[in-house]
Amino acid sequence: MEKEKNLPLFNLNIEYNDNDTNETLVSFVNIPASLTEWLKFSENSLKFKLDECEKTITAPMFRCNFPIYRKIGEAEFNVQMDAKSVKNLCLKMMKDGTVNKINLEHKGEFSSEHAFLFESYILTENHKILYPEFADIETGSWIVSYKITNDSVWGAIKTGKFNGISPEIPFDMITVEKENDINILNII
């Protein structure tokens, strides 16, 4: 992606608030902004392959301190979240139950018919020992595993149409720390 460009970097801060009514949802996408494709687990081992019986995927929901390229109109910039904001995002989505409201490529209606979350954790160094595939993922990132329950979605995963996860975060629940004088909230 465009991560290599020398662009402004904005830290997105999410505070956990029990009174927040915004919904943060999930999308299965072809090119995840985290630049990390999911792992497709087999039924009996930690070999990463497709298995008709298991139909499970594991991937970062959001990577900690990882710049994500954005272009809105003519404005190009990177955004990232620190470990605290990633954990707050996790807490909010788990509390609200929106981790199971999924659409495809950020289009169409959200549904719990595609998949359901069965595992979620904030990545630690110990997890990296268990899952060497995550050795390059930042500690503090949010990792999730989904059981795919829709055959057409599973077929699209097998063929590479969907390769990762992308949360949809309402911008009114985010505050921004600016690197320079650009006001990202006015851009968005």
Image: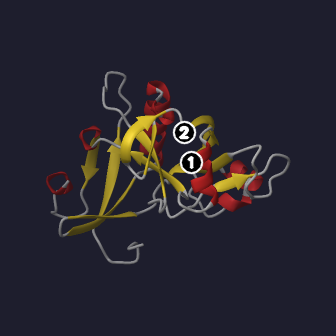
On the image, the x and y values in percent for residue 155 come to 62, 53
* Residue situated in front as seen by the camera: 95 or 103: 103
Q: Say which amino acid is labelled 1.
A: Val
Residue 25's disc number: none
**Residue shown at 69%/61% (left/top)?**
133
Toward the viewer: 158 or 62?
Answer: 158
Residue tagged 2: 114
Label 2 SS: loop
Which color mode does the image show? Answer: secondary structure
Residue contact between numbered discs 2 and 1, judged by CB atoms under 8 Å = yes
Which is nearer the eye, 87 or 68?
A: 68
> Which secondary structure lies at badge 1?
helix
Residue 64 percent location from the top left of the image: 48, 53
- Crowd band around label 1 with a 10 angstrom C-alpha radius: few (<14), some (14–19), many (20+): some
For disc 1, the marked residue is 153
Frontmost residue, 92 versus 111: 111
Q: Position of residue 79 (x, y in %)?
A: 34, 59
Question: x and y percent of residue 21 in the render?
Answer: 30, 26
Q: Residues within 10 Å of mark 2 (few under 14, many from 20)?
A: many
Disc on the earlier residue, 2 or 1: 2
Tell whether 63 sits left or right of 78: right
The residue shown at (38%, 31%) is 16
Q: Is residue 137 above or below residue 150?
A: below
Res 56 quadrant in image: top right
Q: Is residue 176 left or right of residue 145?
A: left
> Residue type at mark 2?
His
Give the residue at the far front of this rendering: 152
Label 2 and label 1: CA atoms lie apart by: 7 Å
Task: Determine the residue positioned at 64% across, 49% down.
Answer: 58
